[in-house]
Amino acid sequence: MKSKASNATDTGASADLPSLAARSEGRGAVWTLPESEDLNANLLRFPAGEGVGEHTNREVDVVLVGVSGSGYVRVAGEEFSLGAGSLVYVPKDTPREVRAGTEDFACLSVHRRRAGIRIGRSGEPGDGL
């Protein structure tokens, strides 16, 4: 049976993340786990030197898993290497930044699905984009 890079059914989903990352020419979220009510998973891909600037997510813990290339995650000022097969845990309410070190950097971001985006002043619940 030949596997597809990404497959979703009523009973689950599967994805060949390294293949999806290699075939993608985009940046940012290039794949998203379909149809989960409880879980959010995004394949993030960035060219060298790019990524997600420092921000604080106030709602959910996040796990980042390296898929290809190499980069780093800075959590509360401490830098962690992120390469294929490595994992970085980021607790909620903690400043974090993600940066690609190589052109083929990709990682999977996984967290509990958040409530919808809410408009409010900085520091209020829901501002952790």
Image (tube, rainbow, N blue to C red):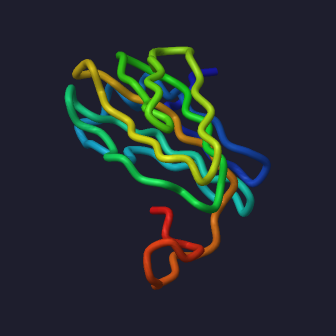
Tally of numbered discs: 0
For image coordinates 55% across by 73% down, the residue present is 126
Q: Who is closer to the viewer here, 116 or 104? A: 116
Which residue ends up furthest to the right in the rendered image?
Answer: 11
For image coordinates 33% across by 24% down, the residue present is 105
Q: Position of residue 13 (x, y in %)?
A: 67, 42
Q: Who is closer to the viewer here, 123 or 61? A: 123
Asked whether, in this view, residue 123 is left or right of residue 22, the answer is right
For image coordinates 42% across by 24% down, the residue present is 19
Q: Position of residue 112 (x, y in %)?
A: 69, 54
Q: Quadrant of residue 101?
A: top left
In the rendered image, the quadrant that contains the C terminus is bottom left
Q: Position of residue 89 (x, y in %)?
A: 62, 33
In the rendered image, the quadrant that contains the N terminus is top right
Tell me if residue 93 comes above or below residue 22 in the rendering. Answer: below
Q: Quadrant of residue 14?
A: top right
Which residue ends up furthest to the front in the rendered image?
Answer: 77
Q: Position of residue 109 (x, y in %)?
A: 54, 40
For image coordinates 25% across by 42% down, the residue present is 26
Asked whether, in this view, residue 109 is left or right of residue 104, the answer is right
Q: Quadrant of residue 85?
A: top right
